Amino acid sequence: MKVRMCCAGLRNLLQGLRFSAKYYSKHNLPQTMCPYSKSKPIKCCILDCSESMCTHRTAPPGSILPCRFFSCKEGTKVPSKRKQNTSRVTSDLLHKNLLKSEQENWNDISPTYKAVTKRIKGKLEELHNMYTRNSGSPRMRFGENVYFEENGCIFLAKADDVDEGNADILFSIEDLGFSDAFIQRIRISPDQSYMAISLKSENSEEATCIIMKLGNFPVVEKVIPSVFSFEWAANDVLYYTTQKNLKCQNVFMTTFTYQKHTKLVYTEHDARFFVDLYCTKDRRFLTINSNSKTTSEVWLVDCTHPFESPALVQARTPGVFYHIEHRKEQLYILTTYGEPAEYKLMKAPVACSGKDNWQLVYALEKKTKLVDFEMFSDDCIMFLKNAGHLYLNVISFVSHLVQSIQLPTWACEFELESHLEHTTSTCYFQLSSPVHPPKRFAYSFKENNLIEQAVQEVPIITNCHTTRLLAKSKDETLVPITVFHNKNSKELHRRPLLVHVYGAYGIDLNMSFKEEKLMLIEEGWILAYCHVRGGGEQGLSWHRDGCQRNKLKGLHDLRACIMLLHELGFSQPKHTALAAASAGGVLAGALCNTDPALIRAVVLQAPFVDVLNTMMKTHLPLTIEEQEEWGNPLEDEICMKYIKSYCPYQNIKPQCYPSVFITAYENDERTPLTGILQYVQKLRKAALDHASRKSKKVITSFIVPGNWIPNIILDVQANGSHCDSSWEHSLNEVARHLAFLSRELEEVCHPQHHSKPCK
């Protein structure tokens, strides 16, 4: 077994305290992750460089990277070690044989796509250089000092000199022998005497934290392995969480001055919960957040007394999430407490923090998604999404007024920039869409207006049209769709259509800018994003309506979306492809079983396609926590039957399937490779069985729809993981996916060139 790893930023918390994925266990969620959303700048980027938000977010705290512990049902006989070992040897041998077979098959068929892949790579590199040449690295300003990262190095410059290129190097990945790692997260101590950095390799889920003592000659003070999140509680006091088997349960405190010591300060004993750290914007409190997919609990560390024991804000209550900010001895609480069970802003005195003392400050409107939240000295800003449009609400703590500001209609995604000083008078953020490069905006509290910053010297996108639709699902629910196409395209019903879907963990589809999306638009493709239930586009209820025993609603939504697109003249089934990743593979795979005639080709990235068998294996690291998303088939027979009714692997049957290209990773700890291998074998056999039954009806001069043999391809990558990939690896992966789609959809009109079926 999502979404991405990343910081304990508030936005991640809001995107779902309830999920794990690639970002998340079966998503990144991408950043719900669509198969084409992994292209990264060649230079590394600072993740979570601010005190409150991260620059690149891939998953929420509290449930990303959750672990599972082995457990047996009460009364169940535990197999003997001999039987366990025999079974494991047999399973390992089967896994190796299947993997070898798929690798040989890929080696045979990959030359078919070589020329197209090369062309696409060249175009993507050109677009990448065009749209990133003027993009600077995120910067952290502390008074007169500015910290920033470029090409694996961290620099320090004076604010007046940073644009002149005058900077001192504080840290270099290569100098310390971490050439295969990238900088994931940075924290500067309040007095700037220490810097904590986490480094992560693309082949591992775990990060290493390096503490540097700053000064004229920065030196490495300490190295801590297997760290997830960390925050400075004081100038020389660092709190951090450790990660093991995709799970964070322990919080430690370490000091660096006269009495250097490290001690355990908190342990979470419930396997459903994941622990991370966060500092309030005014740095008064460090929060220890323990979250499952359905509830949360927060403990406060007073940064003025960092050695005192943490204090509980409110004991965990089933179904209630909450997150803490602070202002003038008042706790500001983002929570789902009360009706309706959507996020609302409440407050309570620090001395009386229990939920009985929570007072409502502001409640969201119905079907509104709280995307992000930023606290300032006299105001707070809520970034919201409603009916596919982004807007922000500015709440004044002085006048008690709320101002709502509509953001540009083309915007689909936003990125909040670092605001290390909560007394600042301006909030900076960037807006983008899959086909619009990021534009920088600022909201001025003094002027009470929105300002578009200086436009960078990049081409302006003028030929792309954005359309927002509503599809009526099986139960009459209206499901949002966002469509992009070239304004100059004619006969849209003949154009190739790429549909994106996710629908899990309350996570939105990733709609940030990607060069490959722009390339497709320029080449005449139509892009459609189906915001089905199970995701989070319309608030927490949208997720609840698509998880556990409501999962089929997401499938019905996806079917309705694709059918509406075709009815409105956006392409047709033989020109339509479907893209999904991680947990999005559940709905994509289910649609292939129930409605294969709606699509011609499918691309899946690290897909979750064997829900039932995976959820029956409690020894896997994510199963226990995932029960709150999918259910517990071990103890609930009705749940078992329900999962079996939609599970992609369980419902494969001999029929005419679309062509399928799957990318998987040998080192993936979230989506078991064995399940993907078995899925591919079973799917290919079903397609061939169907073709053999219909062989007498095949006309040799051309392929009759329904009797062609689809390509079922599995590309297993030795490098990369569910969460991170290098720029070069991502580029190759995206190019292979697009080459496959280009060939499959092009061959609708030229069937004589159809590649040989997989072995």
Image (cartoon, rainbow, N blue to C red):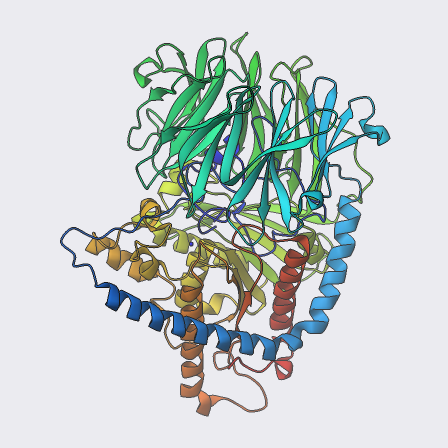
Instruction: Classify residue 326 as left or right of residue 547.
Output: right
Instruction: Classify residue 47 as left or right of residue 598.
Output: right
Q: Position of residue 329 (x, y in %)?
A: 46, 9
In the displayed structure, 158 sits above or below 211; it is: above
In the displayed structure, 727 sits above or below 308; it is: below
Residue 138 quadrant:
top right
Residue 616 shows up from this direction: yes
Q: How many marks?
A: 0
Instruction: Classify residue 753 as left or right of residue 619.
Output: right
For the point 60% across and 46% down, the residue is 467
In the displayed structure, 116 sits above or below 213; it is: below
For the point 37% across and 39% down, the residue is 293
Instruction: Classify residue 587 as left or right of residue 460.
Output: left
Nearest the camera: 755 or 747? 755
Q: Position of residue 4 (x, y in %)?
A: 54, 44
Nearest the camera: 519 or 29? 29
Q: In the picture, which quadrant includes the N terminus?
A: bottom left
Residue 8 shows up from this direction: no
For the point 51% across and 54% down, the residue is 722
Q: Position of residue 603 (x, y in %)?
A: 54, 63
Q: Residue furthest right?
A: 164
Residue 688 quadrant:
bottom left
Nearest the camera: 4 or 236? 236
Q: Position of residue 686 (x, y in %)?
A: 40, 77
